[in-house]
Amino acid sequence: MEQESFPSHVVVFPFPVQSHVNVMLNLAEIFSLSGFQVTFLIPDHIRKGPRFDQISSRFTRYPGFIFKTISDGLSVNHPRTGDRVKELFDSINATTRPLFRIILKSRSLICNGRAPLTCIVADGIMSFAIDIAKDFDLPTILFRPFSATCFWTLFCVPKLIQAGELPLKGVIFVTILFCIYGLSSSNYAWDSDMEKLVENVPGMEGVLRLRDLPSFCRVEDVSNPQLQHVVSETHRATNAYGLILNTFEDLEESALAHIRANIPKLYVIGPLHGYLRPLQGSKSLSEEDRKCIEWLDDQPLRSVVFVSFGNMTVLNIHQLMEFWHGLLNSGKPFLWVISGNLTTGKCHFPADGSVKKGKVVDWAPQEEILSHPATGGFLTHCGWNSTLESVCEGVPMICWPFYADQQVNSRLVEEVWRVGVDMKDICDRRMVEKMVRELMEVRREEFVKSAQEMARLARKSVSEGGASSVSLDSLVRDIKVMSHGKST
Ligand code: UDP
């Protein structure tokens, strides 16, 4: 006798920071469009946030979609910035991990006529989901909202340690100087070591320097708990049913080939926001200042430098002022997002006439700005979402990476895709001005040409028959196969 068949029911479980939640909402929406029931585990600080009603109204059109709240154990007001990510890791381990088990055990996700659970799609930095889900006979697919190249680099860290390429030398000394005095690290002897090419990340020979390794590698002792955590989480992906990456083949072919050799069920389905364009209103979890669009409308074509460091970067006041003066001295109009988290200091921008060229907002509709005809360049921290959004719109970048995968991404921008310049580890006004001129004047044509080609490839990948689109189809098919024969 044939078993009754239920729709697939996927639990989507993001890491509890804004950018990860946002990109997994996109994934959840794609699942909903594929006819799946989706339970989205939303962090309670975002559920209590100012924009939650708007976000949830985006999903009312999908009757099979529901939110279920889960806590990360930190207070609502905790900044959850990159410099305090250890607190987040610890708190997730102490609070979210047991809560996740309780939620699965309670069977509350399958009451009110909802289908039995098919699988868990969890953020790859929370691989504990694999073991807990296994106890309930559920497969887990991990989603890592990083670049594939960073994932592969972290995967190779044990090899780097074995070969003596890690630990880096002199890191602590320079980091302390950098933090206390806000100094550029470029003048120190340590720097010459940092220029050395990395030899033990296959496929990245001749590209990555020690300086370009993920920020977690900037420790003097390789037993550093944070480094150990991200590396072991990366390896744990081999224990999952499969791995989803938000990138596309033409962008990161080499790293993807190496990952695939270790993780055969690899779904390369990005850029995710590329599938959803016609459906979108604003998706932001923060209140956006839409007046900046009117300001942009008044600027000449391709003249404006958009400046945003995402939601997890922290600048000291010295760095903030160096960016400010560098931008002013470049003479180009700029639109800068300075969110409440960006600096712990107090900004005192000079109120002279020259400031007319710049506009500062708390939070902006970034995707809309990148696609605006007045936007000519993007000064970015190279968070993976920002990088992908810029690639998709064909906007050249100036990169100032802060942490995690950003050091790797910025190297790809400059050295592999050739769509911008990388000013990592240097933060002085002369350099900022020089980089802006290089991007907007001196090498403009070269950058725009390669950026437009990358944008074309990005669009192709998510269009019908494109590599990402085909991979997404196989992900949807595999999930449907999992749900065959499930019973309550
Ligand atoms: N973002 C936005 N408005 C802003 C600044 C950023 O909507 O004013 C969005 C941006 O479009 C991107 C996300 O915030 O999707 C930032 O993610 P990313 O991975 O680049 O950086 P993170 O915040 O994780 O450091």
Image (spheres, grey):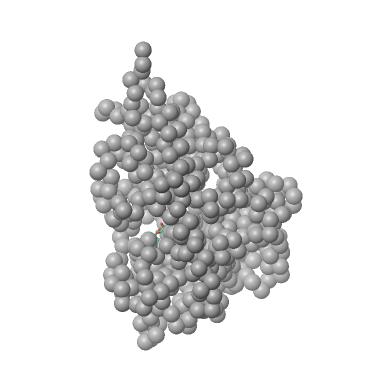
User: In which quadrant is the C terminus drawn?
Assistant: top left
User: Which residue lies most toward the right here?
Assistant: 163
Query: Residue 300 occupies which quadrant of the picture?
Result: bottom left
Can residue 94 be seen here? no
The total of numbered circles placed on residues is 0
Q: Nearer the viewer, residue 315 or 412?
A: 412
In percent of width and height, residue 226 lies at 58, 49
Left or right: residue 387 versus residue 227 is left
Q: Nearer the viewer, residue 346 or 470?
A: 470
Q: Nearer the viewer, residue 203 or 366?
A: 203
Q: Residue at x 67, y 50 (%)?
A: 202
Query: Residue 346 occupies which quadrant of the picture?
Result: bottom left
Can residue 130 be seen here? yes
Q: In the rendered view, would you say 61 is above or below 378? A: above
Q: Residue at x 57, y 37 (%)?
A: 264
Image-quarter location of ligand 1 = bottom left
In percent of width and height, residue 336 lies at 40, 71
In percent of width and height, residue 352 lies at 38, 86
Q: In the rendered view, would you say 298 is above or below 387? A: below
Q: Nearer the viewer, residue 215 or 262?
A: 262
In percent of width and height, residue 195 lies at 69, 65
Query: Residue 174 occupies which quadrant of the picture?
Result: bottom right
Left or right: residue 377 versus residue 165 is left
Q: In the rendered view, would you say 346 is above or below 218? A: below
User: In which quadrant is the N terminus drawn?
Assistant: top left
Q: Residue at x 47, y 64 (%)?
A: 452
User: Which residue lies most toward the top here?
Assistant: 1
Left or right: residue 238 versus residue 55 is right
Q: Residue at x 59, y 55 (%)?
A: 214
